[in-house]
Amino acid sequence: MNQPIPTGPDRFAFADDFYQKMKAEDGFDSERHRYYFLAADYHGRQAQTAALVMLTEVIANATGTDHADLDVWREKIGMSWLKACRSREWRREQCKPRHTEDCQYADPVPEPKHVLLDVGTRVLVSDLVYNEETRKPERSNPQAGQISGHAAGSGKYRWRREYDIGIYSTHEEFAFADNRVEVHPDGPECPPVPEPAKREPTGPRMYVRDQRGRQGYVIETAKVADDGEVRLRVRWFRPGARPVWKEAGMLDIIAAEDVERCENGQTRDECDSGENQCEPCRQKDDEEGDAIEESMGLR
């Protein structure tokens, strides 16, 4: 069985012990006395060497330098390993990979490896924001949605934002396939689309515009009182917009021809800017971008 290597403090204690034995016998002429003297001298020099290596390591940690020989010296000279971490960088042996839970500099437990979720799973997609206090990224601004596909060799999800229970955007967004995408706390099953409430038959769609230029269409009318002003429930042409009530006097009725549409005839709730464009418009932009790169000799 291997015996533990004596440390620097052990060497110092051995040297002092042998010296005290020799001093107690008050003699230097016997063979035993010479042994005490040589042992004390040997262990004393070993203790000095250990102290010098320890001082070198303190300087190395203070200056942010590291040398492989220090680890070898630890093994050869038998220096004491740290019982507790002195800082986030000056770590004891068991905290080399990460500071464990019993350490005052404990690191958060690593998150489990992300398991690729199936298409159709209801999820929460969050942003990752770095927290300076905890020194780790944290989820924020979770958005409910549904995974609609995988992209980039399963390195990303295609997903559709959930605007209401069972109602999802027609446009896809992308998110990295990692722990910022998690199964919805209510379960992976997407709720069914709510059945539309029975309404009175309607005629042609009435389009309106407010004072800020927003456009939409009327889906319901009502009055607060018998002699009150007519109120209109309007759905704006904006992705994910929910119907809102507006006083009729605050809106202008516009013709269907005056509704803003993209080149492919889609209203602004179906084709907006950036990732909210409709598929034909995105395809056209991609083709134009490819043509520009080709003309510049980049392809």
Image (cartoon, grey):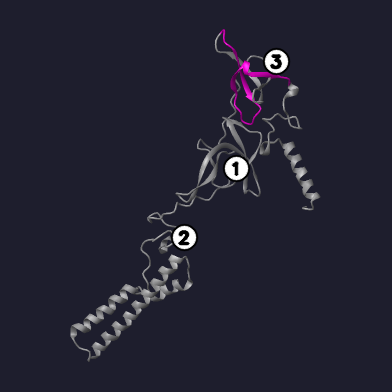
- Specify the amino acid type for callout 3: Gly
- Mark 2, residues whose alpha carbon is within 10 Å: few (<14), some, or many (≥20)? few
Q: Residue furthest top?
A: 227
Q: Say which label, 1 or 2, has the lower sequence index.
A: 2
How many numbered discs sit on the rendered protein?
A: 3
Q: Label 1 to label 2, Cα distance in Å?
A: 33 Å
In the image, what residue occupies the spot 59% across and 12% down? Answer: 229
- Which amino acid, by three-letter code, is at mark 1? Asp
Q: Which residues are magenta?
A: 226-255
Q: Which residue is mark 1?
A: 118
Q: Please identify the quarter of the rendering in which residue 196 is found.
A: top right
Q: Are marks 1 and 3 in contact (CB under 8 Å)?
A: no
Reply yes or no: does residue 177 show up in magenta: no
Instruction: Check disc 3 and report its element: helix, strand or loop.
Output: loop
Circle 2 sits in a helix, a strand or a loop, which is it?
loop
Q: Which residue is mark 2?
A: 97
Any part of residue 276 in sight: yes
Q: Amino acid at mark 2?
A: Pro
- Residue 116: % across, % down: 58, 46
Q: Residue at x 43, y 58 (%)?
A: 88
Q: Is residue 255 left or right of residue 113?
A: right
